[in-house]
Image: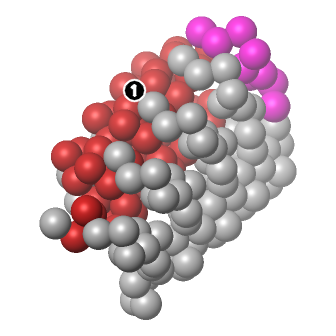
Amino acid sequence: MLLERSDLNPNIPDILDGLTPLLLAVKDEDEYVVRMLLRRNDIKPNTPDTLYSQTPLSLAAENGCEGVMMALLEKDDISPDAPDIRYGRTPLSWAAWNGHQGAVRLLLERGDVNPNAPDTLYGQTPLSLAAEKGHDKVVGLLLERSDTDPSTADDEYG
């Protein structure tokens, strides 16, 4: 009922963690509520939390929530490469770091995702993050994409 009200702003974050209703639904892995929220024309799917600047897509990728990710990726105005401010990691980096093969695959299917985007913590790419954690299937997925550069060195250890 609340979503039917035109005087409701669905993009206002809470004061504790800076989570919008969309971020809260993503955090709860509630695909149904995410889809309900995304039906509103005034929802901003790239609004990050105010603590780490993690977008809904980044949070969904970090947790491997493929259904939620698909709902978000259907939006024309989604920014699939937006990094957070804490580590400077993109959604692909988070999915690779945590070994979420399906999430990595969903992101790599898009032409507008940079598989070589380094984080700002150590300059690690999604490939180096997946390799460090021993996620061999994710490493394989990343190497299947022709524009993945396997020779990119990180800033900390080279």
Q: Name the image quarter holding the N terminus.
A: bottom left
Q: Is disc 1 placed on a helix, strand or loop?
A: helix
In depth, the one of 21 and 36 nearer the eye is: 36
- Residue positioned 56% across, 55% down in the render: 46
In depth, the one of 24 and 40 nearer the eye is: 40
Most frequent secondary structure within the magenta stretch: loop
Note whether 39 is above or below 13 in the view shown: above
Q: Is residue 129 visible?
A: no
Q: Quadrant of residue 139?
A: top right
Which x, y percent locates residue 42? 48, 58
Which x, y percent locates residue 145? 64, 12
Kind of residue sitting beneath label 1: Gln
Tell me: 90 left or right of 63: right
Q: Return the residue at label 1.
A: 101
In depth, the one of 48 and 133 nearer the eye is: 48
- Residue positioned 40% across, 84% down in the render: 14
Which x, y percent locates residue 68? 32, 41
Q: Is residue 43 visible?
A: yes
Residue projecting furthest to the bottom:
15
Count of picture labels: 1
Bounds of the magenta segment: 144-152
At label 1, counting other C-alpha atoms closer than 10 Å, the crowd grade (few under 14, some 14-19, many 20 or more) is: many
Q: Quadrant of residue 20?
A: bottom left
